Image (cartoon, helix red, strand yellow):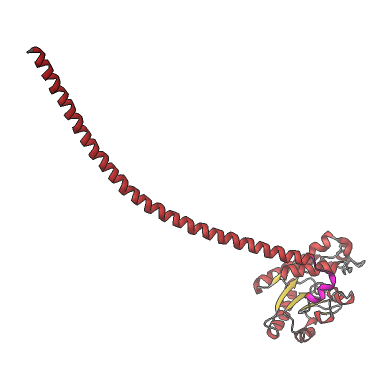
Amino acid sequence: MKIRRKIRDKIIKSTLILVGLVFVGLVSSRYITSQAEDSFNSSIENSKIISSGVELIKKLEFKDVIEVENKIDDMNKKKDIKDKKKDIKDKDLKQIFENSVIMGDSISESLIEYNILNKSSVVAYKGRNTSTAKKDVNLAVNLYPSNIFMAYGMNDIPYFRGDANKFILSYEKLIQDLKSKLPKSKIYICSILPVQQKVIDEDKFYYKLDEFNNALKDMCNRLGLTFIESKDIVVKNPNLFEKDGVHMKIGFYPLWLRVLLDKSNL
């Protein structure tokens, strides 16, 4: 009897343990199922977010690719232009500037004397300044240039006795006259070239040269014109000065014209 009772108690005990395990299993299963459902729903939401993010990234990547490609194209174009300019020979300058006119004084006039440009591309005369150049406007207009490079100032410094304000007023009148008669032409303003120290020592007004150039820059900013600085050519190559310390040797001009090309994108 005792043995049977012990066996029965063990069976009951085992059964209770089994029932308990099953109960825990069911609860755990429901919990896991619930968690799985929540996880599944959450994964769907996350999937939507991720998908949206991927689309955004793709768009941004595509945009970046286009921007990079555009930058590369621009760089290649600039490189091509640069390479072409490197290959330009002096004889080609006449053709390049055939639709342009350089207006100025004796420094610009040397472009014709040295046979670097055609006469039809240069309207410049010894002693010219912004006041006396008014008589040259009609000559320039009759050439119908697409581009006008104005290179005045060297004679204006002593003419206006070092007064930069008077110089600018005179220059603006000359520019307005050209604009009214050639509204489609692009106008570029060239810097006044440096002079040697002996020139400054001999003429008290030439120490104002930098002040005149700064006034030109301000004028160009106000009028929306391109100011072309060329002083580095003679600063780096002082041997290009003629003996008078003002005018330039023939080697200066191809270098100068290349600077004009670079700044005007002809």
Q: Is residue 83 magenta?
A: no
Q: Residue furthest left?
A: 1
| Residues drawn in magenta | 87-95
Q: Is residue 163 left or right of residue 180?
A: right
Write down the quadrant of residue 155 in the picture: bottom right
Percent position of residue 185, x then y = 70, 80
Q: Is residue 89 magenta?
A: yes
Please determine whether, in this image, residue 32 is positioned above or below residue 95.
Answer: above
Percent position of residue 234, x then y = 83, 63
Name the foreground residue: 253 vs 164: 253
Q: Is residue 217 left or right of residue 105?
A: left
Please determine whether, in this image, residue 99 is positioned above or below residue 196.
Answer: below
Q: Is residue 215 visible?
A: no
Residue at left offset 79%, top offset 84%: 136
Q: Is residue 98 visible?
A: yes
Quarter of the figure that contains the N terminus? top left
Write down the quadrant of residue 180 in the picture: bottom right
Write down the quadrant of residue 125 in the picture: bottom right
Majority secondary structure of magenta residues: helix
Name the foreground residue: 196 vs 41: 41
Please determine whether, in this image, residue 213 is positioned above or below residue 20.
Answer: below
Quarter of the figure that contains the C terminus? bottom right
Residue at left offset 63%, top offset 60%: 72
Residue at left offset 24%, top offset 38%: 29
